[in-house]
Amino acid sequence: MEHITLLLAIVVVTALVFDFTNGFHDTANAMATTISTGAMKPKTAVAMSAVLNLIGAFLSVEVAKTISGGIVNEDGIRTEVIFAALVGAILWNLFTWLLGLPSSSSHALFGGLIGAAVMSAGWSSINGGTVVTKVLLPAIAAPLVAGIAAMLATRLTYRINRNVTDPNQQKSTAKGYRAGQIASAGLVSLAHGTNDAQKTMGIITLALVTSGVLAPGSNPPMWVIVSAGVAIALGTYLGGWRIIRTMGKGLTDLQPPQGFAAQTSAATVILASSHLGFSLSTTQSCSGAVMGAGLGRKGGVVRWSTATRMFVAWGLTLPAAALVGAGAEFLTKQGPWGIAATAVILVGGSFAIWLASRREPVDHTNVNDTDGTADHGTVADVEPQGVVTTAIAAVQPPPTLGAHPTDLSTTIPAPTAAPDDTARPSATV
């Protein structure tokens, strides 16, 4: 019993470490566009996001119940399986953070849990129907729905303001959209806390159930909710600057109206899914919304090379984390020495990744610098537009907010120059 108690404590701490990595890994979801367009200073943005993530953790437990009693069968799952699953999720989170890839922390957790459970008890331990309906289908639908919503919202925004030509009105409108960006970024942060903090709550609850502390089907205890909320908030405050750089400067050129449309669309999708118990990826929702907003403005360009790297990372996350989780579970099955070896691998691997990140540090002072766009100003200067961008952008209304004639000349030449706008120039996102 003493061994089980110690192991349970290790699992709870490891789960909170995962929650911490989830926070700094996914900060970009809420704040990348706000930081890149200059609506908020980097440190202020992550501080606001951290507070709202903490508040969001208390709003719902539907996603936590999906994880603790839906994806895997609780009967026959040992506490060691949860530990192995967390090892797979944490190492994948840190690896993609090192590469600056906004992969899904949620899918890393699911992959690690599925791989460890299969290694421990076989495929019968997985509830395939729940995985398909509440994990895989939302993973496909979320970025598409958020992207389409953001594209339509962007088109509507520019259409409504197409007749705004007075410089003073343009300045006032641009300020309003920047304020809207701050509000919508706060909404995304709240949604992120509501959805992602619950995943750690679900994992800890599952560990408590497997060790006999809680009855099957129990809701997360209050101390679990509080600790998960604090862990994700602390991680968010640190700021995953590498991924913020990718999300904020690598996908497309966003102006404040587009940023507002993208963040509002993503937050709506995330909050709706949390209410329904769908444990979708906030990363995929926000990335899809950013690309949709980029395509919603005539002259907008999506950097498909960066998007392709993201798509590949999304596709690899579940199987890669599952393989690591399965390997970790193979070790833990060997007994106490296997559990110790798994812990050493986790700590050693995490430290090695951190050392590698120090070779080229990224923080709030250089988060808006990129190798590809720092010297040229826009994504269009470093990457030609693709067929999809050309086709969609050709039928969009010309921008009137925050657009300069030079913006269009570097992307898709317009028949006539757009009215001059004295609002803040667009930031490369």
Image: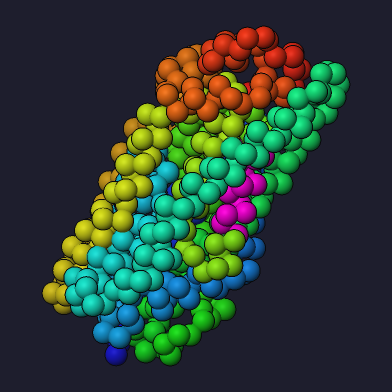
Question: Residue 343 in the image: x percent, y percent?
Answer: 26, 64
Q: Quadrant of residue 347?
A: bottom left
- Magenta residues (range): 259-271
Q: How many labels does the image show?
A: 0
Residue 209 appears in the figure = yes
Q: Quadrant of residue 229?
A: bottom right
Residue 292 lies left or right of residue 306; in this view the side is: right
- Is residue 343 depicted above or below 249 in this figure? below
Residue displayed at 21% across by 58% down: 323
Q: In which quadrant will I find the C terminus?
A: top right
Q: Does the magenta stretch include residue 264?
A: yes
- Nearest to the observer: residue 216 or residue 85: 216
Q: In which quadrant will I find the N terminus?
A: bottom left
Residue 141 lies left or right of residue 354; in this view the side is: right
- Nearest to the observer: residue 393 or residue 20: 393
> Taken as a whole, is the magenta stretch helix, strand or loop?
helix
